[in-house]
Image (cartoon, rainbow, N blue to C red):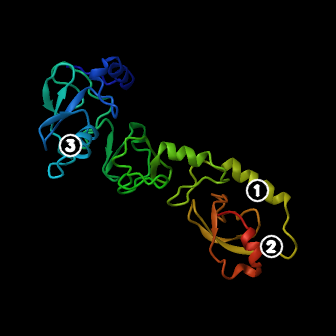
Amino acid sequence: MPYNTNYTELDAQLKNETDARRGCRHYSRGCRLRAPCCNELFWCRHCHNEVKDAGCKDPLKAHQLDRFSVKFVRCSRCDLEQTTKQFCEGCGLCFGAYYCDVCKENFFHCLNCGCCYAMQLRDNHRCIAGAMRHNCPVCLEDLFHSTSQVRVLRCGHTLHKKCLEKLLTSKTIIHTCPLCSKTLIDHTFHWRQMDLALAQTPMPEEFANKSVGVLCNDCQTKGTTTFHVLGLKCPNPQCGGYNTRRIDKRQGGGIPQAAWERGGGG
């Protein structure tokens, strides 16, 4: 059967199915999973775990579904049970606009990261082993079992979409990853504004032309830069950002402690 591979049309097809055939509150899909652990049908692993784990009154029988072990699904339109796939063998219904044969989910599976991502991130993300198998660095909720939307940062780390939005709307001048301190967005315009601010704000004579050691959180360049109370510019000309940290604070380059405490840039 010449199945449709136009993802926009497939999304519309799923939405046009009746509510009973669209899936659960966690996912919109056209099939139910056959859980090999209890041989029952569920829309997704979260539905299974709500009944068989969190909702199970007998602790000895409580268990969670290993989605990697799922081998069979049942079509919500024609009720044909079959091996896991994207399209129904019987009626051609698209079970999901995107499908991962490893995780049995409607995404693609990154072997390096060990988890599934949205299709737009295929060949367009920085791989970090086990990126999803940790808690969100903002709210500390487990990302792997969370049903909330997750975002992959430019540095490769992951957190909830709602938590990222909180970070981006905070009053912090430079928005950085909570784990590695790399910038979350392109700050090129902000760096130019910083250059202008430093040029218009000369340091007192006693601090003029003082150099300090810095490490750039974005490009990882180590070097020396001119000290300024407003910020410390990355010595790498290809970077030129101000997301830096001082690494020779102990010596201070002759700069008093009070001035160090007033200094910006990380």
Kindly tell me whether residue 18 is visible in this rendering. yes
Disc 3 marks a residue whose amino acid type is Lys
Label 1, label 2: how far apart the Cα atoms are? 16 Å
In the picture, the quarter occupied by the N terminus is top left
Q: Residues within 10 Å of mark 3 (few under 14, many from 20)?
A: some
Looking at numbered disc 1 in the image, what kind of residue is underneath it? Asp
* Numbered circle sitting on residue 209: 2
Q: Give SS at disc 1.
A: helix
Q: Check disc 1 and report the residue beneath it.
A: 195
Snapshot quadrant of residue 89: top left
Secondary structure, mark 2, is: loop
Label 3 or label 1, whichever comes before in sequence order? 3
Left or right of 258? Residue 110 is left
Q: Which residue is mark 3?
A: 52
In the image, is residue 29 above or below residue 221? above
- In the picture provided, is 4 more to the left or to the right than 196? left
